[in-house]
Image: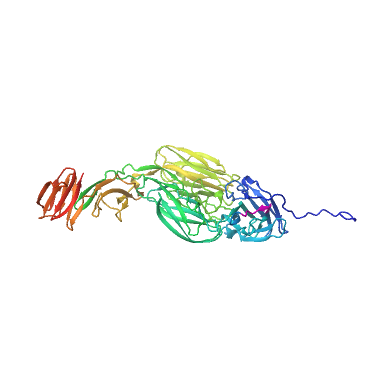
Amino acid sequence: MTDGGESDIVATRALAVGKPYEEMTESFANGRLNHIFLIKKLTSAEMSWSLYYDNGIQGIASQDKDNGYAASVADYIDAAGALETGKLLIPSDIDNPALSFYTYNITDEDQQADANLIEISVAEAGSNEFTTIYSRSVNEICQGQPGWGKALASLTAYKGKTVVVRIAAVVKAFKYTAIDNLKIENMTGHDLSIISISAPENVMIGNGYTVDVNVVNEGANPAEQYSVELYADNELVDIKECSDLPVATTEVVSFARTMHQLAEQPVSYHAVVVYANDAVSDNNSSKNVIVYPRQSVLPAVTDLTAKRTADGAVLSWNEPDISQGVYETVTEDVEAGEAWAHSLDGWTFVDGDDFAVGGFQNISIPGITIGETKASFFVFNGTETGNNTFRAHSGDQYLASMFRSDDGTVDDWAISPMLSGNAQTISFYVCSYSSQYPEKIEVLASSTGKQTTDFAVVREATTVGGNWELVKVSLPAGTRYFAIRSVATGSFMLMLDDITFEKSYPADHLMIMGYNIWRNGEKINTEPIGKCSFTDAEAPDGKVTYVVTTVYNSGESSGSNAAILDMSSLDRISANISVYTDGRNIVINGARGKLVRVNTVDGLTLHSATAGDIASIPVASGVYLVTVDRQTTKVFVR
């Protein structure tokens, strides 16, 4: 205002005022803010920041699973905009203060990298001079992996100062740049931690599986050399040597394991990261994860016997009865399937509509070209996408059926393995990927074969909701196969997981291929034994436990009954002479023509004679001294 009049209104630059925040933890939970932020447009092109619920942007759910995140949105390349905090007092009593948050790496069907830039700048309160302290592409922050990745910028230079922090997004590839779980934290100079350990809950005996350990560098410096130790029931079982873990990056260290064929008890795993420079030890060990063995229902030997002879331990048994076949209740969780495969062991998939399928805007599906590939059900790995909206009901994988590219009616069949034939209730979990474009399924049953014309409807077509839901269907006696059929029109993607049913191993499909011999828990044959007897000529001294497993064309049985021998009395006095017990008899083999004496420990002689090829001396339970040619051994008779 002057003597000449009053000017038009002009807005000043926004300036943070008031008492500074002494902490900053903002997770945007449920699409709401706990702190004040300023939205700053940095270019002439329009750009805005908004709060979103899970899947508010298709395919993006919150990093910390609290139903909220923030994201910038712009339609033009090089458009830039920022979130500015209010005044922040950077603590002076921590060594390495840092700003951290997560950003989401979007990919499209062409696997284009998310080149959008994220820049972090800092200005002291009251100043408009921002200094850029961090600039990386989203793809770099996320190490080329789709999904959420952690950005971490040191604020050590501003310890004890009051500042304003600006988080800017610059469009280079995609219109959205999402962030979540923002906070000021203390970066220790050197700090590796284990953030998770995972393994399947149940594993069939004899099968392999993987224990995955997630290690993150939460320190201010890169970690050059470190190792991860894996413990099973508190016993060290494997070590992986690792190197070069940059700041704020995560490494998945995988351990291959096998469920022992004779396992009956669960295995408890935990992991420890070992890093010489680590300044924080509290986060070096993982929690325990427990893996339960699943027993085979294939018929097992039940009458194993073991006997000591001069030639060693002689085992014998009878062939298991397979005349009636067997059946078991199983849950197909799809975890054993190959990710993205269009087949699954035992299952039959039929593409009844014979039409090309559709796909997703920002996520490609390996093996599927939108509008070209014809497909039925296939194995979908929900974790490889890095997108929580694709998560399985359990584990990582499930069966999926895509919509037709012309939005016509889908006709995809998932036909089960052979059933027991008993009346039973099957169950499964099903979900529509998008509740806006719901799926529809029907369930059918066949008492004969697996051709689609063999099936009759047992559950009429019903609409599927947008959350995992349990479906149960009763099947009549005599049912040999069931089918889950996708029949929606103008839908998106059907998700199917954890299918439980009673599976059959009919007698005419079972064939015994041989037997494996286990001594004290270790298999001692290299190829299956083709007969129902075995001699272990290398039985060690002491108590020995034998178990036999039956090898079939469709798998291997659980262990037989245990046969236990006490070989502690066996002592080869010379290269060709052996002394052992057989029940209440002391047996000397190979001492022909030699003087054999058997004494009690108090000196009483029970036997003294020249031996034949085999000498068998009956005695009572006790401890005896056996002398052959002036060489003496102690024998225990039970």
Is 577 positioned to the left or the right of 243 in the image?
left
* Residue 382 percent coordinates (x, y): 52, 51
Q: Position of residue 326 (x, y in %)?
A: 35, 43
Q: Is residue 75 left or right of residue 189?
A: right
Which portion, as a residue range, is magenta?
Answer: 84-92
> Which of the image's four quarters has the C terminus?
top left
> Is 91 in the magenta?
yes
Q: Is residue 41 left or right of residue 96?
A: right
Looking at the image, can residue 316 be seen? no
Q: Position of residue 455 (x, y in %)?
A: 46, 42
Taking 103 as reference, is 422 above or below it? above
Quarter residue 121 falls in: bottom right
Residue at the spot 18% in from the left edge and 58% down from the top edge: 575
- Out of 636 and 53, give the one closest to the viewer: 636
Number of numbered tags placed on the structure image: 0
Does the magenta run of residues contain 473? no
- Residue at the spot x=62%, y=45% of the render? 30
Point out residue 441 in the picture as x, y percentages from the top left corner.
53, 43
Q: Position of 43 compared to 488: left or right?
A: right
Front residue of this view, candidates 81 and 100: 100
Colour setting: rainbow
Quadrant for the N terminus, please. Answer: bottom right
